[in-house]
Image (cartoon, rainbow, N blue to C red):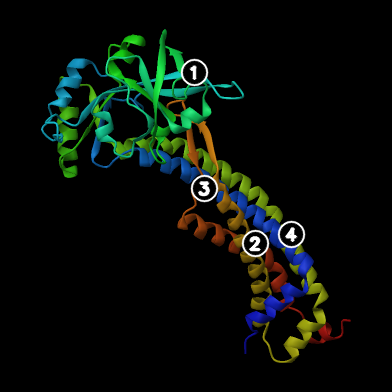
Amino acid sequence: MRIPLSYSFRNLLTRRLTTTLTASGMALVVFVFATILMLAEGLRKTLVDTGSYDNVIIIRRASTTEVQSGIDRYQASIVETQPEITIGQNGRRLAAKELMVIINLPKRGSEKPSNVTIRGINEQSLLLRPQVKLIEGRMPKTGSYEVIAGENITRRFRGCGIGEKLHFGMRDWTVVGAFCAGSTGFNSEIWGDVDQLMQAFRRPVYSSVTFKLRDASDFEALKERIESDPRLTLEARREIQYYADQSEMMTKFLRILGMSLTIIFSIGAMIGATITMYAAVANRTSEIGTLRALGFQRRNILFAFLAESMLMSIIGGFIGLFFASFMQLFTISTVNWQTFSELAFSFTLTGGIVYQSLLFSIIMGFLGGVFPAFRASKMNIVDALSTR
């Protein structure tokens, strides 16, 4: 004979105030836990989505980012002749020699300075990245002092709106267009003609060469050829893996920070659940004795009180997730620790985060209710019935 789950649920409704307070504490913990996971996932997704599986990025050997890399024109020309590179509709190879530098710009309103990525591009750069769409204005003319800005940059930084001027590299640059790159990191960049930018920053070398493979399975053979070529001091990576590596350090830090905060908050929530359940046991001593007298075994009492605690935690888990889901409406920015430039991204809620958050709330409910449940199950029938 088992005690029905409805019994535990009705007892929670009877103690509305204590149930609400305890569930609210657990909801807060789940909210923090889910938000931190959403933050890390949003950052990871933004950088991973920036890359394409079919694209390969070539940088200097031992460099971790394009900012640290340098490829001279001779080496870039060798890379461009690789037979695995796709030929575009214009008859040219889909390969882009690009420059990446970091500059400092003031934010709108606060005038607080922050680092922004400048990318030098050529006419093949957009063909390699179909997720980038011009949403306003026009593309910069080749050989001109014109740039286009990602939509996150146009909103957040002074001088980056269409028609406005920026001063860097000892020159004035006119913003002639704005582009949208979806949820990718390109939204936080400014693009201009690579040759003009190299002259402005007195950079005689490119930062990277990016190209599209005719067949994605050709990557390993291409990688081995490039990295073993004695004329080259370069390494090849799939673009998607390159950007995934960019997010690794920051996401790991966010997860460690989030878990540390969550553990501290969860201890308080579990103590609250334990106190609540101990109070429930003390107030229902006669009821427990009656259940035992009716033939319910100790394990039935144990499971009934555990069910109450876990039901309370699940309710708190759903409430915490409900409020955490609204964080997806916000876009925040942080410094990419690999490039030291600002990167804007949104919170991202996934099925995995929902599962982890609910599992975490159930574990809190179990740990908070297990000791009071054991105490209730070990009560003597005669002593429990004699208590008033």
Which residue is farthest right?
388
Q: Looking at numbered disc 4 in the image, what kind of residue is underneath it? A: Gly
Circle 4: element type? helix
The answer to whether the residues at label 1 and label 2 have Cβ atoms under 8 Å apart is: no
* For marks 1 and 2 on the same chain, the one whose residue lies earlier in the sequence: 1
Q: Which marked residue is nearer to the observer: mark 1 or mark 2?
A: 1
x, y percent for residue 137: 38, 28
Residue placed under numbered mark 4 in the picture? 272
Gap between marks 4 and 3 measured at Cα: 26 Å
Residue placed under numbered mark 3 in the picture? 38
Residue placed most toward the observer, 255 or 296: 255
Side (left or right) of 285 relative to 146 = right
The answer to whether the residues at label 4 and label 1 have Cβ atoms under 8 Å apart is: no
- Mark 4 Cα-neighbour bin, 10 Å: few <14, some 14–19, many ≥20: many
Side (left or right) of 200 relative to 282 = left
Q: Quadrant of residue 27?
A: bottom right
* For marks 4 and 1 on the same chain, the one whose residue lies earlier in the sequence: 1
Circle 3: element type? helix
Looking at the image, can residue 304 be seen? Answer: yes
* For marks 3 and 1 on the same chain, the one whose residue lies earlier in the sequence: 3
Gap between marks 4 and 1 measured at Cα: 48 Å
Residue placed under numbered mark 1 in the picture? 104
Q: Looking at numbered disc 1 in the image, what kind of residue is underneath it? A: Asn
x, y percent for residue 30: 61, 55
x, y percent for residue 221: 15, 37
The answer to whether the residues at label 2 and label 4 have Cβ atoms under 8 Å apart is: no
Q: Tag count in the figure?
A: 4
Gap between marks 2 and 4 measured at Cα: 13 Å
